[in-house]
Amino acid sequence: MYGNLIDALPAVLSLGNIFAVVIGVIAGICVGALPGLSATMAISVLIPFTFGMDPLVALGMMAGIYNGAMYGGSIPAVLLRIPGTPAAVATSFDGYPMAQQGRGGYALQVAVVSSALGGIASALVLMLLAPPLAKVTLLFGPTEIFWVAVFGMSAIVFLLGGDIIKGLISAAFGVFVSLIGVDTITGYERYTFGHLELLDGINIVVLLVGLYALPPAIGLLEEVRDFDTQNTGRLNTTSIWKAIPSMLKYWKTWLRSSVIGVFVGILPGAGGSMAAFLSYNEARRASKNPEDWGKGEPEGVAASETSNNADTAAALIPALTLGIPGTAVAAVMLGGLLIHGLQPGPMLFRDNPEIVFGFMWQFLFAAILLIFLGGALATNSFAQVLRLPRPLLGAIIIALVFIGVYSINNRMFDVYLMLGFGLIGYFMDKLKFPLPPVVLGLILGGFAEQNLRLALRIGGGDWSILASSPTAKVLIAMVLLVIVSPIISRRLRARKASKKVAA
Amino acid sequence: MNHESNAPSSPRSRRLDPDLIAGIVIVLAAGALLLRTAGMPAMTALLPVSMLSLLVLLGIFLIARCLIRLKRQGETYVPIQVFDNARRFLGIAASIVLYVVGVALLGFYTTTAVMIPVVAWCFGYRSLKGLLLADLIFTGGIAIIFVLLMGQELPIEFFLR
């Protein structure tokens, strides 16, 4: 089972692949350091540029960006108290007070070492758990695959938190978009409106770039915001290798936060920010000096940064084995796999083991590289990214988005389509409609339909086939649990609150 | 930002609840698309009908929820604020549309070389030296990557057609 893992190593160690991971980590740190930009956005913009690349090179860049951005988000969180990514909010609680005390450099060093350790733990868990899970899912038939797709969509809608009606609307919209084009079984054209460009359906990259890359670019131009970058000039960093021995006392926090991050990462719908908050709270509860937390306690930075990076590769476990992305970044990465002709799911492990296992190695290397690239000297340089003028950046991203989408098929139609999705994404974001269910709907919609129809054909049109096998029954129960559990927990919370008021 | 239009107690803001508008748009769009499923074979129409019906239903829920909230909370109801600065958003949208039209008519490199400094200047970055340098590095860099290294064609320049 793990033989393929070793076989994939030589290809990953080629110069081109290592270079791709290095570039990805550097780009990821820069993107993460810029408030308003995220790993999701960076990978969406990158995907079209990777068409001509070897799949491993492309995936290496994505792995690097993901890991780099998770750490990069801590730079403005520490220096400006503005988290570069949502997952870095908890980092700012102690990181910013440290920067005010002139210990910003040390806070970033703790962040980079903790991020690297969280990332390493996450990559190891991915390597250990994904292959056996993929073997189990290989036994699934069309009925089970259909329910897995339904489970994935329900999980992201109901466990994501927020407004369930809006989440369902997002998911239904994503599934609808996946149905545009020629029905491969009957040959009937669905919602093409006579446009030949729509016969093959809507390219996932067009949707991803529109939803995830255009709105942040608009945001950069829209906001009139000047950052007080005075903390970036006085980081007072020593060599990271000299600083590491003083951090070894955080080993328990690193361990605990890694476990929390990995666990949250595997759960569909939960993300890095939830992992960071949970592990920050747990670390403070376990601390001997909880009263110092929030006033510049480095262990707080260690807790949140370890877990938000421990979430990265773990989020890919359901994505790679079942085709269900647990987070928006994982959804975007699935899009990256799809454009390289790699269908996420158990077959990926059988048909392209060198790529899927190589990707796992790249996650591990990206996490290790964080220490070298995000170390003392680099941390000082990355902090300067905050000085980049936001209007200029917004204009450049608009041009990059154009290039990326145009070069998919060398046609303006895709650009117009992307602008449409960008506008929809902008308003969805403003009206608090979650975006990940749209992407998941697009990825899983066609997949679910295909398997549903196949199952019905096998069952001679009898709908009871959908609940005929024990696995299908378990999956149906899981779907129901996912739907019911938020309602029950909300009721319980309300009851607890009313009891408190009564007391 | 138009503070008047976003004031919580303004009757105008209650009428223009974005969730209400979104609900109406969803119901109308999904309803119109649902009509197009009539001629489809049964199995082809299965998922489109399910999804569009679900969208219509959810849109109605959204509308009903807004109306109930409006009735319950009355004057104190504060709808979601869509724009931080509506005029600025329109400016950005116009810039993007002009850029795309410009690329189609004039070519990619010419339009990009003009768009980057103009847009950055209009939206607040006023260093002429920085603008020109960034423009040169970005447009030049893209030309090197796409023309020399990748051989990838972008919309051709008007003077080369």
Image (tube, rainbow, N blue to C red):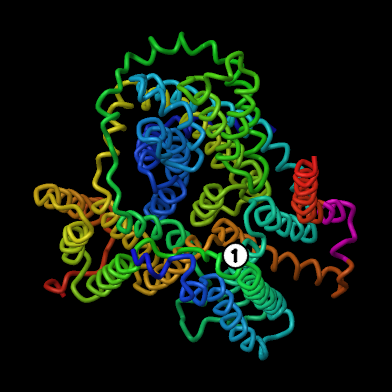
Amino acid type at mark 1: Ser
Quarter in which the C terminus of chain A is drawn: top right
Task: Magenta stretch: give its range.
Answer: A465-477
Q: Is residue A326 magenta?
A: no
What x and y, as percent, mark residue A14?
41, 32
What x and y, as percent, mark residue A104?
36, 23
Horizontal arrangement in the rendering, residue A465 relative to residue B9 (left or right): right
Reading the image, the residue beneath label 1 is A170
Q: Can residue A186 be seen in the rendering of this structure?
A: yes
Report the residue at 43% width, 51% height from top.
A41
Horizontal arrangement in the rendering, residue A108 relative to residue A345 (left or right): left
Q: Is residue A470 magenta?
A: yes
What x and y, as percent, mark residue B16?
49, 75
Q: In front here: B67 or A302?
A: B67
Label 1 resides on the chain identified as: A
Q: Main secondary structure of the magenta part?
A: helix
Residue A491, above or below A428: above
Quarter in which the N terminus of chain A is drawn: top right
Q: In front here: A478 or A364?
A: A478
Report the residue at 23% width, 52% height from top.
A392
